[in-house]
Amino acid sequence: MHNLHVRILATLLVVIGCGLCYYKVTRLGLPLLSTEDAEVWTVEARIEFKARSATPVKVQLAIPKSPAGYTVVDENFVSSDYGLTTEDDGIRRTALWTVRKTKGYQVLYYRIQLARDPMAVTTPSTLPPPAVAPPEYPEVLRPAAQAVLDEARRKSADVLSFSREVLVRFNDPNPDANVSLLRQDLQTQEDWTKRAIGLLAGGGAPARLVNLLMLRDGVRHGELTPWLEVYDGQSWQPMNPRTGESGIPKDCIVWQVGDGPVLDVQGGRFVKLEYSVGRHTQEMAVVAEQRARQMGSRIMEFSLFSLPVQTQNVYRVLLLAPVGAFLIVVLRNVVGVNTFGTFMPVLIALAFRETKLQWGLILFTSVVALGLAIRFYLEYLKLLLVPRLASVLTIVIMLMAVISLLTHKLGIDRGVSVALFPMVIMAMTIERMSLVWEESGAWEALQQGFGSLTVAALAFLLMSNKQLGHLVFVFPELLLVVLAAMLLLGRYTGYRLTELWRFRAALRG
C-alpha cells in the first residue's frame, strides 16, 4: 500500500513538472539550451542637483521610446518623495518628477534594462516632418551656405544623396573658405550637428536632431552623442553628421528625438546628468520571459525572473543543491558510498564552485588534517562535548585564517578562498572523523573521509554544469521530477553495489 502511494505521488510530481516545462517551451518560448545567450544592457541615468529653498521642483528627462532592435526587460524610476508621471507625444517620451517642497542635494535615477531581440525588425519612422522655415543666417554666412548647397545639389540626385554631399563637404578635413566660415564658431558636437541640420533645411532636405547613447560596457560618466535623421519623402533615415554615412552604430539606442532639452530642472541649480552602462550575458530566457509577460501569462508572474537580480543569483546556486542531494542519495543508497554526514559533501561542493576542484581538495584536506591532529590533542584534555566542539570550531577558523595569510603572502590567490568553506560543517567533520578513528580505527575514518571528498567532487562536477544550472533556474518545476526520483529511491530496499562486491562469494554459491 505504501509503495503504491509513493508511486502515485511520484507520477503526479513528474506529470506536473514536465507539463509546466512543456508549456513554457512550446507556448512561452523559453529555451531549453543554455547556449542561447542574450546580451542584457543596464543603462542608468543619474540626475543630481541642489534644490532651491521653499520652491517647488520639476524635473523633466527625455527617456527612450521603444528602442529599435531591443526588448525592454525592465524599467524603473528611483525617486523617494517625488511624484512621477511619464508622457509620450508620439515622438518624444519624457519622465516628469515633481515635489512641492524639498531641500539640499537631490539625486534621481532612471534605469532601463535592454536585451537585444533578434526577432525585432527595425522600422524607420514614417511620421512626416512639420513645416520648418529655412534658417536665417547672418549676412556674412549666407553666401557661404548657398555655395555649399549649390555644389551639393549639382552632385546629387535625391534627398539622401544631397544630404550626404552636404555632410561630406561640411566635414572636409581640408575645407575651403566657405566651409571654414560656416564652421568657425562651432564649439560642441551638438552645435556641429545643428549647423548641418540648418544647412540641409536651407537646401530643402528636412532633418532633425537625435541623441544616441552608445552601449559600451563599463561606462560610468557617459554622454549622449548627437546624430541626425533626414526625411526622404517616405521615412526618416539616420545619418552620421560627421561622415554622411547612413544608419546608426550597432551598439546604441536612440535616447531622444528632436532638439529639445534632454533634461530640464525647475527649482534647482548645479544640475548634473550622467549615464552609466553595464553589460552582462543571460540566457535567451530574458527576452522570452519579457515577451511572455506581454502575452499576459500568469505563470511568468511567479517566475524567478521577477525577483531582484541579487536574489536571482542566490537561487541560481541554491536550486542546484537538490541536484547534489539527489546524487548523494544515489551514491549512498544505491552505490553504498560512506560519507561524513548527509549534506556535508553538497556544502563542500558549493564551496568548490569558488575555489575550483583541485585547490578545493587541497585546502579542504589541509584544514581537516591539521584540525584532526589538534583534535587528538584535545582528547587528552578530557573536555565536555559542547566546549570541545566550540574549541574545534575556533581552531578551524584560526587554521583557515592562517592558510589564507600564508597563501596570500606566497602569491597563491586561490588559497584565500578557503574562507568560503562552511566552517561549522568542517568542525563537525573533524569531530566525527576523530570519533570514527577511535571507535572503528584509522582505516574506516580515512575511508569515510575519502568517500566524502569523492562525493563532493562528483557533486561539484554535476552542479557546475552550465546546462543543468540553466534548466533548474528557468524551469524550477523540474525539481519536482528530482523529488519524485528521491521518493522512489526512498523505498529502495535492494542490494547496494558495494554489497554485491562484498558478498560476491555468497552470491556465487
Image (spheres, rainbow, N blue to C red):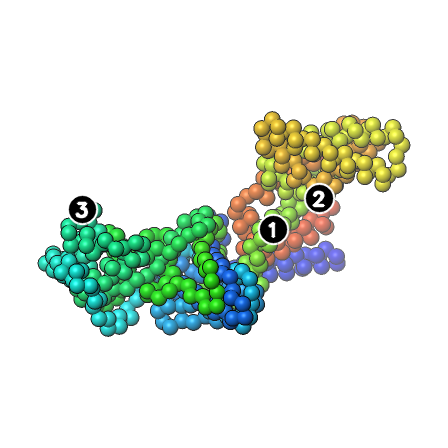
Tell me the amino acid under the disc marked 1.
Val
x, y (%) of residue 168?
19, 52
x, y (%) of residue 264?
42, 66
Disc 1 crowd rating (10 Å Cα; few below 14, some 14-19, many 20+) is: few
Q: Secondary structure at mark 1?
A: helix
Q: Secondary structure at mark 2?
A: loop
Q: Secondary structure at mark 3?
A: loop
Tell me the amino acid under the disc marked 3.
Asn
- Mark closest to the chain's N terminus, 3 or 2: 3
Of circles 2 and 1, the one toward us is 1
- Mark closest to the chain's N terminus, 3 or 1: 3
For this rendering, which residue is in front, 72 or 398? 398
Q: Which residue is found at the position 35% from the left and 66% from the top?
A: 260
- Drawn side of residue 221 relative to residue 189, left or right: right
Q: Which residue is found at the position 79% from the left and 35% from the top?
A: 392
For this rendering, which residue is in front, 396 or 402? 402
Tell me the amino acid under the disc marked 2.
Phe
x, y (%) of residue 195?
25, 59
Q: Which residue is mark 3?
A: 174
- Mark closest to the chain's N terminus, 2 or 1: 1
Q: Quadrant of residue 117?
A: bottom left
Would you say the residues marked 2 and 1 are in contact, meaning their CB atoms lie under 8 Å apart?
no
Q: Which residue is mark 2?
A: 343
x, y (%) of residue 150?
12, 60
Of circles 3 and 2, the one toward us is 3
Of circles 3 and 1, the one toward us is 3
Q: Which residue is mark 1?
A: 314
Disc 2 crowd rating (10 Å Cα; few below 14, some 14-19, many 20+) is: some
Would residue 398 be visible to someone looking at this image? yes
Tell me how far mark 2 sits from mark 1, CA to CA. 19 Å
